[in-house]
Amino acid sequence: MNDHQTKQITNEETYRRISAVVAGGVSSTMRAVAIPRPLVVRRAEGCRLWDVEGNMLIDLNMGYGPHLFGYADHEVLDDVAEQFRNGHMTGFPHELDYRAGELITELTPSIEQVRFANSGTEAITSAIRLARATTERPLLLTFEGHYHGWSETVLRAGKLGSEPSRQGDGPPAPGALGMIPEALNSTLQIPWNDPDALEEVFASHGDRIAAVIAEPVMGNSGVVPPMPGYLGRLREITKRHGSILIFDEVITGFRVALGGAQQRYEVTPDLTILSKVLGGGIPVAAFGGSREVMALLAENKALHAGVYAGNHASVRAVVSTLEKIRRRPQVYADLEALGEYAQGQIQEAFAAEDRHVLVQRAGSLMSVALLTRPVDPSAPLREVMAAIDFDGHRQLQMAAQTLGIYFHPNPLEPWFLSTAHTRDDLAKVVATLRLALSGLRR
């Protein structure tokens, strides 16, 4: 068969072949909604993807956020490759553990001791259990729109779908088929950035609340920074009631500042969860806090397990990534400027096409949502969601993907900028958005 007779491979065909042997074609449910127009990657480098058809796309999803320095960062990957050659998993402590722990405790204000895990969900589950064991209290307080993994006691309806649930008041609805109906009975939830709701829930349940867990910058239902003073109020009320404050910095850790959101907003929690940027794209997570809070683990009285937790390849990735960040602290000022530029250009592009948009940002973490009407960014989540054009945004994403730009089709999912993105790249993104908007059905 000559070249003219050779059948051209397509994303659609390859995805169908994958789906025959991988259930749903993906290994994470969220990814199923991320590709309304099939996209199968062959390779990635910098801020670009190449699909199986040979198309090149500028990516704004960046693996859901771990690639602060872009895809295929050879400095980190060369170190990890060397570790594989020297043994990547033994089940014993490794001399690398000290250096990784030392870097985390140096850079993260709240952490004196740390434990490693394989994923954010694992680390969060362990931290919540530790908080309950330490306080000997049952209740966990969460915030509407925040996501803390898919474990049984925190996953509420809507968090893994195309948009959050709009259910009203009443018993919390489990977030997945097969969950125990009572799984959320010990988990309370209040709106984000609502000081009155915070005071009320502690007035009613304060002596039974083991912990409060929050994304210090909400990043899973649009990017919503804390209102001025809110994190400080959260810190004060948890101390007053003897509850443990947990910051889920899976997204914000080493992204919005060198020391994460807790450094950016100058509020120190009791426990911190880290992942994503921590390993530069290698699967790893960590949780840690003061020696006092970590005491039950240090004494081997509390349980935290996992065969691959703290494997040597992942810990080497942590050391390599954090040493690179430590050498280049100016990266955060650079990314802040890049994010500010991107935000302004995107807002101008939507205005030029006479379309409403909500762009919210903290450093290089940003969300972009097509709206049907203007909305106050500080409005409650349900009010913001009611103004978002979910269908229109999905159409916009598919058009942009065809034109060589990828961002998540769910407008509540963040965009992640990296040092690999340039202003020229963002100019192409903005030009593509304008072209896609001009062809979008109103």
Image (cartoon, rainbow, N blue to C red):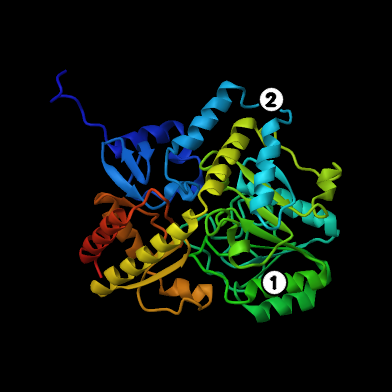
Q: Is residue 426 above or below residue 317?
A: below
Residue drawn at the location 53% of the way across and 43% of the way down:
324
Q: Upstream in the sequence, badge 1 or badge 2?
A: 2
Other residues around mark 2 within 10 Å, as few (<14) / some (14–19) / many (≥20): few
Residue type at mark 1? Leu
Residue type at mark 2? Thr
In the image, taking residue 84 as reference, residue 411 lies left or right, namely left
Where does label 2 land, which residue?
A: 90
- Residue 329 at x, y percent in the picture: 52, 53
Q: Could you tell me how far apart the alpha carbons at marks 1 and 2 are, in whole angstroms?
A: 41 Å
Residue 87 visible here? yes
Looking at this view, is 166 or 229 the one in front? Answer: 229
Quadrant position of the C terminus in the picture: bottom left
Residue drawn at the location 24% of the way across and 64% of the way down:
434
Residue drawn at the location 62% of the way across and 50% of the way down:
274
Residue drawn at the location 72% of the way across and 44% of the way down:
115
In the image, taking residue 228 as reference, residue 31 lies left or right, namely left
Q: Is residue 32 above or below residue 270?
A: above
Where does label 1 land, which residue?
A: 234
In the image, taking residue 355 as reference, residue 106 lies left or right, namely right
Quadrant position of the N terminus in the picture: top left
Q: Tell me the element at label 1.
A: helix
- Residue 224 at x, y percent in the picture: 52, 68
Other residues around mark 1 within 10 Å, as few (<14) / some (14–19) / many (≥20): many
- Residue 19 at x, y percent in the picture: 41, 36
